[in-house]
Amino acid sequence: MSGAERLLPLPDVDTAPFWAAASRGELSMQSCSVCHRLRFPPRPMCPSCGSLDALWESVSGRGTVWSYVVCYPPVLPAFADRAPYPVVLVELAEDPMLRMLGGISDCPPDRLCIGLPVQVWFEQLGEGLSLPQWRPLDPATRLSGP
Amino acid sequence: MLRAATIVGIGQTEFAKDIGRPERTIALEAIRAALADAGVSPGEVDGLVRFNLETTSEVEIARNLGIPNLRFFAEVGYGGGAGCAVVGLAAMAITTGRAEVVVCWRARNRGSGGRPWAGTGMRVGGDYQWSAPFGLVRPVDQIAMLARRHMHEYGTTSRQLGAVAVACRGHAVRNPYALQRTPITIEDHQASRLVADPLRKLDCCLETDGAVAVVVTSAERARDMRGSPALILAASQGTGPEHIVMTAYHAPRPLETPSTWAARDLFSAAGVQPSDVQVAQLYDAFTPLVLMSLEEYGFCKRGEAGPWASSGALSWPEGVLPCNTSGGGLSEAYVHGMNLLAEGIRQIRGTSTAQVSNATLCLVTSGAGVPTSALLLARP
């Protein structure tokens, strides 16, 4: 990544625990205190049981690519230096309803496909924020370290 | 027994890359034209329904037109998803007696005014904190994610998406108001540059300035007006579960977009089948939305829309279901789908430049991938 200024998330009261966990290198999901259903994106109420009580639970950080896009110019200046770049939508191993977007590293374009098993890693961006990003789970498809 | 609601006037400005006049001015021009088309004076208007993205308020419109009192005013959110919904809301006001003459409009300088996504800030909160920091920012990226999955699940191809663009362009060639009137081929589509792989430039709608307005009133009142009425047979809205605007990736089956839900209620309320529809105006910000809508509104089974489009089904006059017969957002103009609505009304009136013979039932749909809405228009 070059020195171009990066787009950062703006955590709020519901999402701050997610980003705080990410800054510690943990992928954490909101979990209903009553019915224990995991949910994403975070929100105040459990859509299954209506409880307003939730915990945060670390998950494995493994998943599979549900779909992906390769973004070509024109893109925002914050992403211009890496275009064309891929964005993946990952289904987490814990529950296919937990789908997250992210970038993917160490994956040659011809290896990127729907169904690709991936593992999360955390890109530190400063200001105490880290973005969960992805790389192929199979090391054979990796090109370099973190 | 509720009164029937009809659309009795349509008006629009020219469409342009840079129209050179403010959005409020072109809104007024389109509304004035729609009222003239209906044969209604501004003093008879007692309701206004707008997109919540409109930059002109209802009272500002009313003040300019000299409307003495608004008995009914409302707005609908979610960008292009609001198009049929504003008309549906106007129809509810008519059928329940809350208003007699309601105007709906959209005025948008999207060609000269810049791309909304380009104004994304460096700190992104709300729902987009899960997408924008990762580089998924533009509407084309957000829809391409669903398009790729549709290709994976059903074998849909880029050439099949191209068939949608080619059909729309073929219709635009006949429409003097359309901005893109040079015929294109599948090869042109395939040669256009990638924007959000798998989507190409010719999978994307135009970026235009323009305004469109319609006048809604009761069937009874319409009999005294000059404009030729199109009956609003049914209107519906839908979101489906776990919806997030444009990045609706969290539902159990993300390829079941809000259109699936709007379609169910629409046909149920109208008491007709998709096979009864002779012509459709399907929201076409991007070509895959047309294929997905063909499936979700029940014209073919899931996964069959690609081959169906490639067979020529969408092309006037020989296609089974001519779609976007003015050229649509892809080739006429992108006015958040209100130009699709105007074309739907022209089809019912029999005045389209790609007129489907004996068109008695037309489907119009609004923004897909967002909370959506739809209308079935019929010849009274």
Image (cartoon, coloured by chain):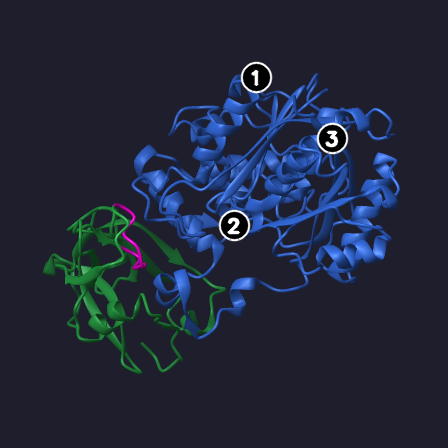
Chain colours: A green, B blue
The residue under the point 27% across, 52% down is A46
Q: Would you name the residue on which mark 3 appears?
A: B346
Nearest the viewer among B368 and A119 is: B368
Q: Would you name the residue on which mark 2 appears?
A: B192
User: Mark 2: which amino acid?
Assistant: Ser
Q: Residues within 10 Å of mark 1 (few under 14, many from 20)?
A: few
Q: Quadrant of the N terminus of chain B?
A: top right
Nearest the viewer among B161 and B260 is: B260
Q: Quadrant of the C terminus of chain B?
A: top right
Q: Is residue B281 visible?
A: no
Q: Is residue A120 magenta?
A: no
Sequence-first tag of 1 and 3:
1
Q: Secondary structure at mark 2?
A: loop
Frontmost of labels 1 and 2 is 1
User: Mark 3: which amino acid?
Assistant: Arg
User: Mark 1: which amino acid?
Assistant: Asp
Residue range (magenta): A40-48
The Cα–Cα distance between marks 1 and 3, rounded to whole angstroms, is 18 Å
Q: Is residue A44 magenta?
A: yes
Residue B12 percent coordinates (x, y)? 77, 45
The Cα–Cα distance between marks 2 and 3, rounded to whole angstroms, is 32 Å
Frontmost of labels 2 and 3 is 3
Residue B377 percent coordinates (x, y)? 65, 27
Q: Are marks 2 and 3 in contact (CB under 8 Å)?
A: no
Mark 1 on the same chain as mark 3? yes
Sequence-first tag of 1 and 2:
2
